[in-house]
Image: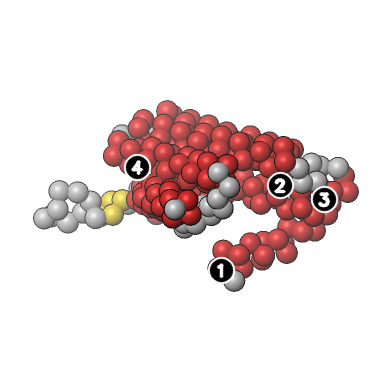
């Protein structure tokens, strides 16, 4: 069993009592999916407000945005689990979940791009935009392949990994800033800092940008082999 599957089963054991409670009071998977979208919109709003009102080097907004992203990510697991355990799975529900997941991710990355541009981290904002493109293409290639009758789940950087990296990086950046402030380490012979607090936030985004696009390309290659 893969590490991801083990982690998923562990989380299921934690949330299953809550799932049973939701079933008893009549909460539907679509309601949970919608709540996840609303939370991601809130996360994007936090980044945008931080970009507009926060001072450069103040990463408190980033930390709160990351926390909300991770919290919203739980709803991605709950809706599917609720549908299965509560015997509420439907074709439309699966479509609704997929569409709102795309909206959630694109809105969140838009908020991050907005924050980085307004705070003067232009190069980092470009990586966030590339991450947005890669995230969209990973999902699109899979959807298009499945429309052609090809199972296409290959690749490392799927949605759970993207959410965890983006959210955890932002939250840890905020926590580091809270305890240590805006740290910048330089050496005389280099024209750029060897470490900045913002790197805790940006490096995971760079990883998502690179590996999401690699995942999309690997899925395209997988489909070609399947069709051949």
Q: Do the residues bearing badges 1 and 2 touch, measured as CB atoms within 8 Å?
A: no
The residue mark sitting in front, 1 or 2, is: 1
Which residue is nearer to you in this view: 54 or 158? 158
The image's mark for residue 79 is 2
| Spatial separation of the CA atoms under disc 3 and disc 4 | 41 Å
Tell me: residue 156, above or below residue 206: below
Which residue reaches farthest front? 228
SS at circle 2: helix
Q: Residue at x 67, y 65 (%)?
A: 9
Return the residue at label 4.
127
Q: CA distance from mark 3 to mark 1?
A: 26 Å
Q: Specify which label sits upstream in the sequence, 3 or 4.
A: 3
Circles 1 and 4: CB atoms closer than 8 Å: no
Picture quarter containing residue 40? top right
Looking at the image, which residue is at 44% across and 53% down? 228
Quarter of the image with the N terminus in it:
bottom right
């Amino acid at each position: 069993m893969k590490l991801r599957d083990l982690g998923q089963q562990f989380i299921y054991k934690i949330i299953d009592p809550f799932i049973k409670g939701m079933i008893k009071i009549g909460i539907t998977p679509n309601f949970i999916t919608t709540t996840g979208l609303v939370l991601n919109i809130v996360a994007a709003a936090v980044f945008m407000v931080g970009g507009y009102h926060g001072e450069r080097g103040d990463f408190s907004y980033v930390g709160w945005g990351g926390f909300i992203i991770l919290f919203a990510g739980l709803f991605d697991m709950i809706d599917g689990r609720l549908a299965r355990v509560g015997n509420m799975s439907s074709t439309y529900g699966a479509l609704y979940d997929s569409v709102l997941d795309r909206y959630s991710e694109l809105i969140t990355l838009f908020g991050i791009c907005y924050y980085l541009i307004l705070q003067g981290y232009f190069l980092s904002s470009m990586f966030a935009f590339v991450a947005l493109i890669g995230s969209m293409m990973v999902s699109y290639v899979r959807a298009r392949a499945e429309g052609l009758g090809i199972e296409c789940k290959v690749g490392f950087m799927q949605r759970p990994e993207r959410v965890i990296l983006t959210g955890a990086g932002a939250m840890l950046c905020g926590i580091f800033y809270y305890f240590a402030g805006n740290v910048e380490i330089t050496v005389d012979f280099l024209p750029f800092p060897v470490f900045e607090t913002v790197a805790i936030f940006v490096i995971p985004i760079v990883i998502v940008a690179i590996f999401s696009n690699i995942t999309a390309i690997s899925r395209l290659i997988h489909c070609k082999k399947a069709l051949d």
